[in-house]
Image (cartoon, rainbow, N blue to C red):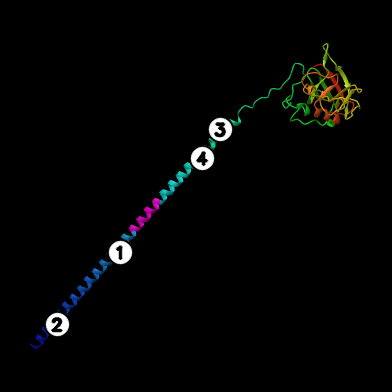
């Protein structure tokens, strides 16, 4: 009986111990479950916060990309506008450049064998002092082949020529017309050695018949440096001399210093 009582006591003690131990185990398990649930909730919160930040960053990046794309589109549109403007301006400039040039009419009377050059000086003011052509330089007579001077009495011109090619045109005034005939003889002559600085009635003479018929400047008063105003404006307009061939002052000076001796002079009415 004693042994049975002890055995029952031992079994009761073991059962109570097991129940106590089981309760403790259930509490520990519940606490671990709670901890795991709390950690999972914190992780979900963190993931939600990161997802919100990611969404905000993506939205900001998308907005920035949209703004940059709008900027690039605006810049491309402005470039297109500027290029179109430049194209239109180029077209307009091309149109301007393709305008027809004004043609300058060349003068020629029925008595002149050649047309006047386009740079012939206008016969106004003191034109008789200057070169007959305004832009063309006097030719270098040393290099001219078949040099000759062609005189048109009624055309009031002297042509410096190479053969029949005109190199320079000068205004002149030959012998006046008396009884339908000029006081300047026509024909073919040659310049001579008569080249003084002046003679009684003019400057820069060049003889072509002895010392009687000359090329020289518009007339001066006898042995004076003063030009006769009533005669100066006849050069290039009408024959008015006593037989010599008058030139403008500058043309006469150039011819005096540059024409070689024995240069052919061809004189015709036209």
* Label located before the other in sequence (3 or 4): 4
What residue sits right under mark 1 in the picture?
43
Q: Residues within 10 Å of mark 4 (few under 14, many from 20)?
A: few
Q: Nearer the viewer, residue 73 or 260?
A: 260
In the figure, is residue 210 to the left or right of 54? right
Q: Which residues are magenta?
A: 51-63
Q: Nearer the viewer, mark 2 or mark 1?
A: 1
Q: Disc 2 to disc 1, how far (Cα)?
A: 45 Å
In the figure, is residue 170 to the left or right of 198? left
Q: Disc 4 to disc 2, how far (Cα)?
A: 102 Å
Q: Position of residue 195 (x, y in %)?
A: 89, 28
* Label located before the other in sequence (3 or 2): 2
* Label located before the other in sequence (1 or 4): 1
Q: Is residue 45 visible?
A: yes
Q: Quadrant of residue 89?
A: top right
Q: Residues within 10 Å of mark 3 (few under 14, many from 20)?
A: few
Q: Nearer the viewer, mark 3 or mark 1?
A: 3
What residue sits right under mark 4 in the picture?
82
Q: Disc 3 to disc 1, how far (Cα)?
A: 72 Å
In the figure, is residue 28 to the left or right of 11? right
Residue drawn at the location 37% of the way across and 53% of the way down = 59
What residue sits right under mark 3 in the picture?
92
- Quadrant where the N terminus lies? bottom left
* Label located before the other in sequence (4 or 2): 2
Give the structural element (helix, strand or loop) at label 4: helix
**Cβ–Cβ under 8 Å for marks 3 and 4:** no
The image shows residue 154, relative to residue 10, as above or below, that is: above
């Amino acid at each position: 009986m004693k042994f049975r009582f002890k055995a029952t006591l031992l079994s009761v003690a073991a059962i109570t111990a097991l129940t106590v131990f089981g309760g403790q185990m259930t509490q520990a398990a519940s606490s671990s479950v709670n901890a795991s649930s709390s950690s999972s909730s914190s992780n979900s919160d963190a993931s939600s916060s990161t997802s919100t930040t990611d969404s905000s960053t993506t939205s900001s990046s998308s907005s920035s990309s949209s703004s940059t794309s709008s900027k690039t589109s605006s810049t491309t549109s402005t470039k297109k506008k500027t290029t179109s403007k430049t194209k239109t301006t180029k077209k307009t400039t091309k149109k301007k450049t393709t305008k027809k040039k004004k043609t300058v009419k060349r003068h020629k009377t029925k008595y002149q064998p050649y047309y006047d050059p386009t740079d012939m000086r206008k016969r106004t003011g003191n034109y008789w002092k200057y070169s007959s052509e305004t832009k063309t330089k006097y030719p270098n007579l040393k290099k001219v082949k078949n040099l000759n001077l062609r005189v048109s009495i009624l055309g009031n011109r002297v042509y410096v020529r190479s053969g029949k090619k005109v190199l320079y045109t000068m205004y002149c005034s030959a012998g006046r017309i008396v009884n339908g005939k000029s006081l300047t003889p026509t024909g073919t002559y040659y310049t001579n050695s008569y080249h003084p600085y002046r003679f009684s009635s003019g400057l820069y003479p060049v003889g072509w018949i002895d010392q009687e018929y000359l090329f020289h400047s518009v007339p001066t008063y006898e042995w004076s440096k003063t030009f006769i105003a009533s005669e100066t404006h006849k050069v290039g307009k009408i024959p008015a001399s006593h037989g010599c061939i008058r030139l403008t002052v500058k043309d006469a000076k150039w011819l005096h210093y540059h024409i070689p001796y024995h240069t052919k002079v061809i004189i015709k009415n036209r």
